[in-house]
Every structure is written in C-alpha cells, then in structure tokens.
Image (cartoon, rainbow, N blue to C red):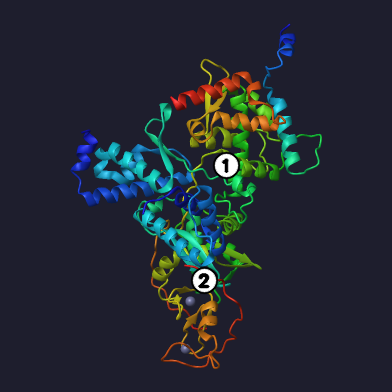
Amino acid sequence: MSMKDSHKLFLQSFMSRGLLDAKEVRQLYRTCCLKFNEKYAEKEEDQKAHLLEFVRTINRNIQPFHMEIKKGVSEEEGKSFYCLVCTSDTSITKLASDYTQPEMEFFKRLIESIIDSDNGEIGSTSAINSVDKLEKVNKKLSKQDAQNLLERLEAQKWIKISRGRVSLATRALLELEQYILEVYSNITDKCNVCKRLCVKGQSCDSCNTKLHFHCAIRFFQNKENPRCPNKECGVNWAHEIPNRSTDVEMP
Amino acid sequence: ARQQADNLNTDFVRFEPIEFAEKLVAFIQRENNAPSDSHSRISPDGWKNLGAAGQKLFSKNPPFHFMAGSFDRDVKERPPKNPN
Amino acid sequence: MTQAEKAAQNMDPAEQEKRLNDLVQYLLIMDQKKIPIKKIDINKQVLKEFSKTFPYMIKKAGEKLHKVFGIELIQLEDKLKGTYMLVNRIDTDVDELEEAGHGHILTPMQWPEEDNSKTGLLLVVLSLVFMNGEVMQDTHLWHTLRKLGIDQDMPHEVFGDTKKLLTQEFVRQGYLEYIRQPNTDPAVYDFRWGQRAKHEISKRTCLNFVCQLYDDRDPEQWTSQYAAVLEDEGVQNG
Ligand SMILES: [Zn+2]
Ligand SMILES: [Zn+2]
C-alpha cells in the first residue's frame, strides 16, 4: 500500500521526535488521520490492528532506504517505545553529521563502560573524566566539552542521567542493539525471556542468566518458588521480583 | 512637504525597522506574560518561544537523526566480563 | 531519450534500484545540516561509476521523496546551481485540530530548543529584510537588532557569535544572502532572502506575521510589501 498524507506526517513526526512512547504513538496516529480527514479506528479494540497495519505500511515503504520504525521496551519501567532507526552501516551512513568524530569516539567509550559495568550505569564524573583516555581522535575534547556532550546526548534521548548516574536510554538500546551485541559479544547478555539485549536487569547468581525487570515480572508471575529459567541451572532466583504493573502492550 | 503627504494618505504606511523592533519586544513580553520593561531586549525564553511558534511558518523538512551506522565498528578482543 | 536515460537503461535494474535507494538515503542524511547538497558529492558518494545517470537518478529520487516522505527535492539556481535541498510539502500544523476540541492531539513536530531560538531570530531577520524592501544594508540591520539585545561584536547569551550565525550559517544554509555592494570601499554589505527562505516561507506568511505584531494591522496597508506578496503569488500560480 502506498503512503497517504497521514502516513507521511506520522513518519515525519518520528523523524523530528526520534522516540515516542506507546501512548504518544496512539495520539499521533489519531492526530494524523484527523488532520487529513482519513478514517481511523475510534474503538480501542479495533485501533490496535489498524495502528499495526498503519506502521507496517510505513515500514514497507521506508525499508528500501534502510529505515524502520522499531518497537522496544524500556529496561527500567518496562514501557513500550517506538523509534525510527537506521538499519544500514555503510559509507553513506558514516556521513551523518550530528556528532563529530571525537564526540562519537567518546560516546562509543561511554557505551563500552556502561555495558562493562555491573548495573548498566556509570557515574557522570567518571564518564566526563574518560575524555582524557580517548584514543584515535582528530581533536581533543575538554572536560567542559564532555559535560556539554552528555547534555546533548541526553536531550536527544540517547542517554539517561539520573542522580549523577549515566545509562543508555531506550533510543540507544533500540537503535544500537545490533551494534552492541556484535561488537561487545563477549560482555553482553541477552534476556532469557525476550531474547533481546539486556543491559539493566537481574542475573542468576549461579549461571549469570539475565532477565529484564519487566520480563522477570512476567516470567515469575504466579510462581511460588521462582527458579532460574535456565533449564540446566534452575537454582533459586535470589532477587526480589519487582512489583509493578507493566504498560499496556502495543503491537 | 513629504511628511505632510504621508500623513494625508492614511492607507500608506512606511516601514520603520526601529518601530518593528519595539513592536516585537512588546509582543514577546505580552506573549510571555513578562512585565514590560523600558530597556528593550528579548530574553532567552522569548527567543525560544518566538521560534517555537514560528517553526510552523516554515516548510522545513525534519532531518533524520540516527546513531547506528554513523561510527566505525572497532571490534577488538576483550576479556570476558568479570562474573561479579 | 536523454543521455542519462540511455545510461540508466544500460544499468543492471537491481543495481539501479539500489543506487536510487542509496541516493534517497544520502539526501536525507545530508539534510541534517540543511546545507545545499552538491551534485559533485552525490556522484562521488553514491553514483560513482554511474554518474552519467545523474539527471535521471536525481529526478527519480525526487519522485520517491515525494511519494514516501512528502518532501520536495529542489534544484537551486544562480550561484547555487548544481546544488539541491529538501523542503517539506506536508502541512504539519495541527493548531486547528486543537482549537476544534478534538482532545488528545499530539503536535507532530518537535524541534530542538537551540533550533527554536535560531528560527526565532531567522524569522525576525527575514521579516526585517522583506519589510525594508527585500534588501537591507548590514549596518542598518545590526542597528535594529541592537534594540533586541543583539550586538554583532558581542557574544550573545543564546546565539553566541550572532554575526557568524547570520553571515555564515544562515548564508550557507541558503536562508540569507550577504552580498557586497559593487564598488564600495570600505565594503558595504546587503542582506537579502536566500533561496531556501523563498521555498520555505511565503512573503504572505511573513507579512501576516509582521501584521500580527502591529496589533493585527490589515496587510494591504503596507502598499509596496503587499504588492510584492501578490507578485510572488502570481509568479507561483502562473
Ligand atoms: Zn527481556
Ligand atoms: Zn541460573
């Protein structure tokens, strides 16, 4: 199916916002259809299927240009997010100019330290201090540059800074999942339940099997004695299962 | 004599840049509910709000921003993570 | 059949489709900085050994951008000949939906804060230039901007080096032209609208904005500016 004006506006909104949560996506879908007087599903039960088809139409049309609206779940609150990502890695995508070469090197090292940490986060001071250790940069960054860069990365939703701790935000996890899994294959884990990259979560004391918090909630629901989901392990799950209601699941 | 002619022709208004600047400052102060002060300048918030409202006057294409594929992959051998 | 069409016909169809899609992706990526995209770079980065197909491929890429994204690919003229830029052709304004009380409207477009402030300044400069008779001498413009708290020799708290922003960044992006008047010594410079400005904002929109500042004055009261609006629209329609 070809793109109607509503699809185009929806896509442009993703280009300008980068990342939207499930509720915003529903509102955007409604807004785009209303704007161009196009039919949309008013009833909630129909809306899910319509919206799914709506996004599929866009993805089919933008796939030749190596773009995709991708769904993911935030590691901390288990909320659904949608993000417009680039799916190729070529000499053309290297021409992206949002960040300079030293800035990208800094971000790469930041990702590495976060992945390498135990809780998927590092202190912002140590993040800033890491500029001194940057190799292969065509221009040195000062600590002030690093501070400003962290703020920019946060504003553009790539990282999250909370109480002086820096972690990867959902946009980065969604877009860089493949990169992180490939480049850091020996220090990354996939969640045993959803099989996707897991940076923040719970891990088995015995076999290191990892689970997202929201996946742990789902997996251990109504289980009296939670045990490690790894069949060869099966030891007691020695973590408190977080008690939160997860966001309404979307397509 | 020229000024007289201008005054007679009520349909004709001449553009005065300084007057424009004053109108603009007053408009922004009104919009931001800021107290109108005598020294005319536009605050950082004033610029931000003016631009935010002005964006829709431009048919500007939203650029596509992404991170994946924008930097080199330097796969290097690393020791496995310490299991603690 | 043109030379470019012949060259394209000699290409393997799969290869042609791949290059075409790469070209669309390239144009979207290069639009990040809003600097007009050069034909020479397109050939170097995307078409390479198939650069003979350029006129055919750029036309096809423009059609795809329009069909999928609602974007118009514009070929620039005069001094910017051989360069291209992207302009949005989808109406993104949803104010009327909000006013109509549809509830839960999400504003589709969200721009970075820094971009908002710069757009505010750009709107002011374009308005001044247009209202002043489509050209404004730089000393005259700076004198006016001083009334807004902007000094060309002093770093501004929001814009930093405003002189650089106006005479370099906005000029490179095609929003403004900054031209030395012939035979002036010391040099005298004029500001005019650049080609991007002409494609992204209409003179009528600009005049309406100014009227809003003047307590909703009737645009027709600005006789010569209103004539320029009509002339602009006449050219566009014809
Ligand atoms: Zn999971
Ligand atoms: Zn285990």
Number of marks in picture? 2
At horizontal 59% and vertical 31% (from top left) the residue drawn is C206
Question: Secondary structure under badge 2?
Answer: loop
At horizontal 51% and vertical 88% (from top left) the residue drawn is A205
Residue A217 in the image, given as x and y percentages of width and height: 55, 81
Question: On screen, B28 above or below B13?
Answer: below
Ligand 1 is within 8 Å of the C-beta of the residue at disc 1: no
In depth, the one of A235 and B34 nearer the eye is B34
Identify the subunit bearing mark 1. B
Residue A112 in the image, given as x and y percentages of width and height: 48, 68
In depth, the one of A47 and C88 nearer the eye is A47
Query: Dot 1: within a 10 Å radius of its alpha carbon, few (fewer than 14), some, or many (20 or more) residues?
Result: some
Instruction: For the residues labelled 2 and 1, say whether their Cβ atoms are less than 8 Å apart.
Output: no
Question: Secondary structure under badge 1?
Answer: helix
A85 sits to left or right of A35: left
Same chain letter for marks 2 and 1: no
Residue A158 shows in this picture:
no
The amino acid marked with disc number 2 is: Glu
The amino acid marked with disc number 1 is: Lys
Query: Dot 2: within a 10 Å radius of its alpha carbon, few (fewer than 14), some, or many (20 or more) residues?
Result: few
Residue linked to disc 2: A249
- Which label number is shown at residue B56? 1
Residue A181 in the image, given as x and y percentages of width and height: 41, 71
In depth, the one of A201 and A214 nearer the eye is A214
